[in-house]
Structures are given as C-alpha cells and as structure tokens.
Amino acid sequence: MQIIRNHAYARAGLLGNPSDGYFGKTIALVVPQFSAQVTLYEWEDVEVVWSQQDRGAFRSVQELVEDVRSHGYYGGVRLVKATIKRFVDYCQAQSIELHVRNFSVRYETTIPRQVGMGGSSAIIIATLRCLMEFYEVEIPLPVQPSLALSVETEELGIAAGLQDRVVQVYEKLVYMDFSPAAALQLQGFTCGHYDVVEPRPWPKLYLSYHTSVGEPTEIVHNNLRSRYQNGDRDVLQAMERFAWLAAAGRAALEAGDGERLHQLLDDNFNLRRSICRIPAWQQQMIDTARDCGAAAKFAGSGGAIIGTVRDEQMLEELSARMAQIGCATVSLGS
C-alpha cells in the first residue's frame, strides 16, 4: 500500500510583517524545530481522520474551556477538507483529469498554536503536497502559496496574507514583494515576486514563544483589515514603512550588517505598536528580550517574538529570562 507523508515547517516573519496582506514587502524564514505532517494512503472511501486537536469529547467543562483557550474552536480537519476542495477546483480549472482512487488522510502537528507561527498554513501546505504526490499533479512553485492562501481566504473566510505560505513552500529565507508592480498572474492566481536571500554571514537569530497563552490570528488581522479598508491614515502609512523596513533588511542581511539589522527589527515592532493594541503579556516578551540586549519584534500576529543576539552568552541569558515568564526559546541557524 502506498503511504505518502509530507510536512511543512513553522515560520517566522523576520521583517515587514504584517504588510504582506497589504501589498507590502516581507522577509521570513522557516522554523525547522516545529512542523505539521500529513499522511495519506489509498482507502476505499475519502476519509479525513480527526486528530487529537479536533476532539469533541472532554472529561469536564473545565477541560473543554482549557482546550478552547489552547486550540481555539476549530482544529485542522476543516483546513484539510478545504485544501482538498480547492485542489480539486484547481485541477478542474486547469483541465487536469484526476484518477478515481480514494484515500484516507490525517495530520499531526508540533507547531505551537495561536502564537503566529503559521500552524494553519503548514497543515494546508503539507496536505497540498500529499495531494500533488497522490494524483501526480505538478503545480508551479509560485502558484502553490496563492492556492494555499485561497483555502483560508476564499473557502473559510479567514483574513491572511501570502507570507506564511511562500516561505513554507520555498523553505528558505525569502524576500517577498507583494506590491502591484511586482505582481504576476499565473494560472488565475495573483503571485508576488519571491527572492531567496543569502546572508553573509548568517545572523544569530532566536525565536521565543509563549507556551500557555495565545490569541487567534484572525482577531489581530481582522482589526487591521477593517482599518486599512476604511482608509485609516496611520495604518496606510505604517504599511508603506513596513515594506521599506523589509527592503532595508534585505540589504543589511546581504551586507552582513548586524547592527543595522538589529535596529530594523526593533523599528519593526515599534511601528507595529504605534498602530496596534499590544497585550501586556506580549509587550512583556519584547521588553524581557530587549533588557538582555537582544533585538525583538513579533514573529507573526503575536505570542512569538524573533530577533538577534550578540553571542551564545546573550542567548543563554535570554532563554533563562524568557523561561521565567512562561516562554520557550529556540536558536534559528542557517
């Protein structure tokens, strides 16, 4: 029996986020310590198997409440089902005939939930890879992120941008330009311009994430989306500045200018704070890292931060200090 397994890593936005959903520019990288894995094999029916995170039985109402706080109201099954539907839509639009064999599919993930590390998009990308392999369908690399994005935005009505999907598809440090001037139309999808960045040397990066507190990504994005659509001047100007920070960051990375990168990372968070309400526990994460001398900004929508450290001693100090406020830390090497 053919067994297909594919994964997609967590991701962290290095610079420019959250402008990816607003025609901006970003730089992001994968976090290989965490991933979503999808397993697919031929079966008599099309079966989407629930994972532990999709469970509907609890020993008490208190356990149900804790599960909702940790994982939200929706698990990954809806993402898998929506990915299958959009994949079939894509194949029909491209006049690709699919074989009639059925399959069973299940997912598992180690990506921390609701801390902005691309957990949902990782499930979608891993599912898409399994479907492509099972049906022997090739989808152009630049199209895959846009197809994956449509799963959430068009099928499920979730506000999101392309950044997560791009870096999870390419699995490199990627500079992304989503401006109208850079946009490409491929197979009915709008795609940005994507370049792999090769830093010389690789910066000393860390990522810290809260292990018990989180906030659904759509809460943050929906607020910004409405303000952007209503022409909020502060938000419009901030998105232009985020894009500039990403472009400046690319230059700093390629020049090996660590001090410049440090300042740009801090500026990215300071700009975000000027247009968003930052919960106290998230601000504490930033303050704790900066007190150690590290640069710090959100890695996504909140709940995880990324930045640079000077050396291993600073990383050890930062890890210890972050642990005291309920956060785990990993080092992001090349």
Image (spheres, rainbow, N blue to C red):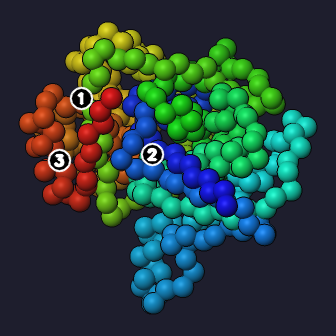
Q: Secondary structure at mark 1?
A: loop
Residue nearest the observer in this picture, 320 or 93: 93
Q: CA distance from mark 2 to mark 3?
A: 20 Å
Label 1 amino acid? Lys
Residue 66 seen in the figure:
yes
Q: Is residue 218 shown to the viewer in this render?
A: no
Mark nearer the viewer, 2 or 3: 2
Residue nearer the viewer, 23 or 299: 299
Percent x, y for residue 132? 71, 44
Residue 169, position as x, y percentages in the image: 57, 36
Marks 3,1: beta carbons within 8 A: no
Residue type beneath disc 2 = Ala
Q: Residue at x 49, y 33 (%)?
A: 171
Residue annotated with mark 2: 10
Q: Which residue is mark 3?
A: 319
Q: Quadrant of the C terminus?
A: top left
What secondary structure is marked by label 3?
helix
Label 1 Cα neighbours within 10 Å, binned few <14 / some 14-19 / many ≥20:
some
Mark 3 and mark 1: span between their CA atoms?
14 Å
**In this rendering, position of residue 134 left or right of residue 302:** right
Q: Position of residue 240 (x, y in %)?
A: 52, 22
Quickly name the residue at label 1: 204
Q: Where the N terminus falls, by quadrant? A: bottom right
Q: In this picture, is 290 found above or below 192? A: below
**Residue under the point 15% across and 28% down:** 310
Q: Residue at x 75, y 42 (%)?
A: 136
Q: Gap in Å between the C-alphas at discs 2 and 1?
A: 18 Å
Q: Quadrant of residue 16?
A: top left
Upstream in sequence: badge 2 or badge 3: 2
Identified at 31% across, 56% down, the residue is 210
